[in-house]
Each structure stands twice: as structure tokens, then as C-alpha cells.
Image (cartoon, rainbow, N blue to C red):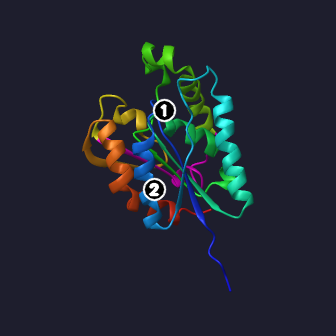
Amino acid sequence: MHTKKPHSVLYVPGLGDRSYKGQQLLISTWRLWGVRPHMIRMIWDEGDAFAPKLQKLLDKIDELHSQGHTVSLVGASAGGGAVINAYAMRKEKINGVVCISGKINRPEGIGQNYRRHSPAFVDSAYQVQASLDKLDFEHDRPRIQSRYAIIDPVVPTSDSEVVGGNNKTVPTVGHSITIATQLLFGAPFFIRFLKKSAK
């Protein structure tokens, strides 16, 4: 009898991920849509380098893939850039990627406060364009869906768009509210996208 592969979705939150319990509760509802959610926290305000944080995510991807899971990634805000960086390094193991209000473009626009308190985020943001360059327009980029608000004063719409990706404007205004509502109400839509994404 054929057994369906488990589908694990790794969620990477953005800055302020020390306060994660609300997001943990929201992603737990993803089980209703037939996937297994896992939160991978970067602890953005700890340490200067992004590399060891990224490695933690890559290790989890490798572990789940070796166990026969279908693996997808979802990242919010700073986590959006992180999951694109991971996807570029493990694209043969990743089914699809979703960015929610993700900081994808214009790392030079990151403010000094973020640079002081979360240098690993800045490090990640500056890697994103090189990661995108590794993702082709025929097979790789169409497996990225970027979802963002009508108006977001924290991460402007143009900073979230992925050229060659599946870009979606959602009917909310604001950064945190868009992330929260997408984690709950957007989930059935982007999980459907992840399930349909070609390998």
C-alpha cells in the first residue's frame, strides 16, 4: 500500500522572534491543511553572523528530507530573506517557498537601528540577491510565492517582490497585522500553492 509522504513546512519568523508563542500558536493551525509545521527561530538579535543561523535551518531541511518528508519553507519579514537563502542552497530538497512581508530587495535601505541590534539580519539581507541569482526563471523562481500588504510602512511592497516569482498582494495594511493574518487566514491558500509546487 502506498503511504503518502509527510509534508513538513519550516517557518522562520522575523525580528523579535524571542517573543514567538503567538506565532507558534498560529502555525499550529497549519495541521488542519495537511502539513506538519516546524518553527526555526534565528534569534536575530544574538550574534553578528548569519551563517550559523542559516546552518541550523539547512540541518533541519537535510534531516527531514533524509526521513522522506516533502519539505517547504515559509519566512516572514527578515525570515523571508532567510528562506530564500536556504532555498538557493538546498533547492533540490525544497518543494516550495512562501515569503510573507519578506525583506527581499534593497538591503541598503535597512535602517541603522536594525544594523546595530540585528547585524545577522543585515548579513542575510545582503546575501539574498546572490541567492536569487542561483535560482532560474523556469523551474526555481515559480516555486516562490511572495505575499505582501497593500501598504506596509516597514517593508515596502517593492522590497517584497520576487522577479519571476508568484507575487500576491493581500488585502491588509501594515506589517505585523499582515504577517499575523496571513499565518492564519492566508495559510490555506499558500499551503495549496506549496502542495502544487513542482519538484
Find residue 127 and report its image quarter: top right
Q: Secondary structure at mark 2?
A: helix
What is the magenta range? 134-149
The x and y percentages for residue 17 are 48, 34
Find residue 2 and report its image quarter: bottom right
| Residue 136 placement, left or right of 164 | right
Say if the magenta span includes residue 197.
no
Which tag, 2 or 1, sits closer to the chain's start?
1
Q: Residue at x 44, y 53 (%)?
A: 27
How far separated are the C-alphas under marks 2 and 1?
Answer: 18 Å
Vertical placement of 55 versus 44: above or below? Answer: below
Find residue 189 and report its image quarter: bottom left
Query: To which residue does mark 1 refer?
Result: 18
Number of on-image labels = 2
The x and y percentages for residue 95 are 59, 58
The x and y percentages for residue 183 are 39, 50
Q: Secondary structure at mark 1?
A: loop
Image quarter where the N terminus lies is bottom right
Vertical placement of 185 versus 68: above or below? Answer: above
Q: Residue at x 41, y 33 (%)?
A: 159
Q: Amino acid at mark 2?
A: Ser
Say whether marks 2 and 1 touch (CB < 8 Å).
Answer: no
Q: Residue furthest bottom?
A: 1
Say if the magenta span includes residue 143.
yes
Q: Amino acid at mark 1?
A: Arg
Residue 28 got which mark? 2
Q: Residue at x 68, y 31 (%)?
A: 52
| Residue 27 placement, left or right of 10 | left
